Amino acid sequence: MDWMKTIFDPRHPIQKADRLRFHQRHRFLIGLTISPDFGQMTGCVVEGTSAGKLLRLKALSFQELSIPLPMRRLFQQWCPSVLAPYRVESALDWPTYLSLQADLTQMAIQLVHALMSQAGQAADRVLAVAFHHCGVAVGAPDQPHGCLPLIDATAMALKTGMNVLDQFPLKDRLEGGTGWPISALPLWILWADRRSPQAFEHRVVVESNSAVQLTWLPPSDGLDATFPLIQQRIWPAADSNELRLKSYASESSASATPIDRIVADICQQIADWQTSDSRRAAVLPPSHKLRLIIAEPNGEANPDGLQRRLMQALPESVVVPCTDYECPPWAMGALVAATHGFLHVDQVPANLPWISGTEVPRILGTLTPGAAGRYRSLLIEMSDYRPPVMTLRDAV
């Protein structure tokens, strides 16, 4: 049995060198998404070091394309639900859907070529393109439904030669989950305090586009046996021409403006998360150790924007824009898409059961092979990675 000890000995010098080389290698991936209001298609090239839960990401470049107004109007005529997640309950208009899919696929191909031209020497090492979007659900909310993808992954793989990862929400829906949003774990990997040897700063990501999304990111030094207790809540936007948020406040606050009510709801939700769970009660941060990262288009220039109002409402907390972390306010979705791609490559379940509603987390995404050389590189990358030991419940 000595040979067994040699193979699995964590102190073996060759194995230690291999592990060090594995976690210090650099990988590249492109993330694409469509904004929740169906206004832009955004993308980014992301460099990743380490793997799995220890993943560290760095964005190299960003790009965005505005979806033409005729295409947006056609989508609204075909799908009355203009805010994600999209749903079609009436009879499907297949010619319209196929036309939209072809146009969006062509936009995605154009965006991939633009990002590849900015990647420089890393262009030949890009493993895949990850397209993260909710798709269009078909059927009534209380009935089992399918989900139509908004891009043709096969056509995109053929015309770009890239491996394509898409349909990340599908398996979560099949497991009984909500399917959207499934950004909690990628946001934690991107923005949580994971400093070594000790992380201490609790962070909250606030995204304001067609809706306001709040994600609580506990600190972690990477030594946890399971993922920290991430929390998430979304406030949908009113279906109107202007960005007006639904009010969850009482009738006594009827005179307040929508931004006042949403700021009050955010502050109340943060307080509820701090006090509702006994597991977190022992490690509650003081107010000055809570950092809010705001992703809001034109937020810094708007005196009545969400960022400035939160700075006034939470004076002891640190409120900063995501641009301080070299991320444009419109690019958060593209970073989430790239992170989902890395999690698929590393065979890491990406949906959190207490948020999406599934019983167990699952590896998300569907892989469409590209050119033979890139597909071979991706298979080698996936075969070299050894996922960490899972609990029996997660492995079944």
Image (cartoon, rainbow, N blue to C red):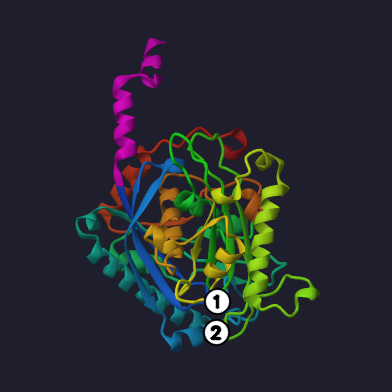
- The Cα–Cα distance between marks 2 and 1, rounded to whole angstroms, is 30 Å
Question: Is the stretch drawn in magenta largely helix, strand or loop?
Answer: helix
At label 1, the amino acid type is Asp
Front disc: 2 or 1: 1
Residue at screen point 67% across, 66% down: 264
Residue at screen point 55% across, 58% down: 182
At label 2, the amino acid type is Gln
What residue range appears in magenta? 1-26
Residue topped by disc 2: 76
Left or right position of 177 against 20: right
Residue topped by disc 1: 304
Which quadrant does the C terminus fall into?
top right
Most foreground residue, 310 or 123: 310
Residue 313 image offset from top left, x and y in percent? 61, 64
Left or right position of 249 against 215: right
Helix, strand or loop for disc 2: helix
Residue 227 shows up from this direction: yes
Tell me, for residue 349, which label it has, or none: none
Q: Residues within 10 Å of mark 2 (few under 14, many from 20)?
A: some
Residue 286 image offset from top left, x and y in percent? 60, 46
Residue 147 in the magenta stretch? The answer is no
**Residue 34 against residue 350 in the figure, above or below:** below
